Amino acid sequence: MIRRSLPAIFALVFAGPLLAAPAGQQTLFNFVRPADVVKVATENADLPQANAEQTPEGEVLRRVTFNPTARPTLRLSPQTGAWDWSQSGMMSLRIQSAMNWAVTVYVQIQSNDGKTLVSRVDLPAGP
C-alpha cells in the first residue's frame, strides 16, 4: 500500500547521549539547537515542525516526513569541515516509525576518502 507520506521520528546520537555526552564523545546532532552543529538537508522529505518534540518519557525527538518516492533522503553534514570519528568506539541512531506499518531505513556514512558504509534498519510499525 502506498501512502502519501511517511512520518518517522528521529533521535540521533553519535558516540553518546545527546545532552550529557561524557568527555571525549561528540554529539553530532542536537534537536534543541540543530543548526549549531550540523547542516540538515532533505530530498523528497520534510521537517514539518521548526522544533523538536518531547515524549512523555522526556526523550527529545524530531519528526521527519518522507514522501513516497524511490529514495527520500535526510542528510546530516557538519557546518564546516569534517567530523573526526577516529576516537569514537560507537555510533547510535535512535529512530522509530510513527506509522502503523513497518519501514526499512538505509543509513549511509561516507568518509572523506570516498569509503561508504551502508546499514539497513528494519523498523516495526510505530507506537
Image (cartoon, rainbow, N blue to C red):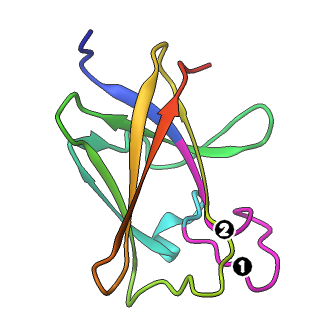
Real-space CA distance between mark 1 and mark 2, rounded to the nearest whole angstrom: 10 Å
Mark closer to the chain start, 1 or 2: 1
Q: Which residue is mark 2?
A: 90
Q: Nearer the viewer, residue 119 or 2?
A: 119
| Amino acid type, label 1 | Gln
| Amino acid type, label 2 | Met
Give the magenta-colored segment's residue range. 10-28
The spot of residue 39 in percent (x, y) is 37, 70
The spot of residue 59 in percent (x, y) is 72, 44
Hey, which residue is sitting farthest bottom in the picture?
81
Q: Is residue 16 magenta?
A: yes
Q: Is residue 72 magenta?
A: no
Residue density around tag 2, few if under 14, some if 14–19, many if 20 or more, within 10 Å: few
Q: For the point 27% across and 53% down, which residue is it?
A: 42
Between label 1 and label 2, give the one nearer the viewer: 2
Q: For the point 48% across and 83% down, which residue is it?
A: 83
Task: Indicate left or right for 35 with 86 as reference.
Answer: left
Task: Indicate left or right for 57 with 82 as reference.
Answer: right
Q: Residue 114 sits in which quadrant?
A: bottom left
Q: Secondary structure at mark 1?
A: loop
Q: Secondary structure at mark 2?
A: loop
As drawn, 75 above or below 37: above
Q: Nearer the viewer, residue 29 or 93?
A: 93
Marks 1/2 in contact by CB < 8 Å: the verdict is: no
Q: Quadrant of the C terminus?
A: top right
Q: Which residue is mark 1?
A: 25
Task: Indicate left or right for 80 with 32 as reference.
Answer: left
Q: Nearer the viewer, residue 68 or 49?
A: 68
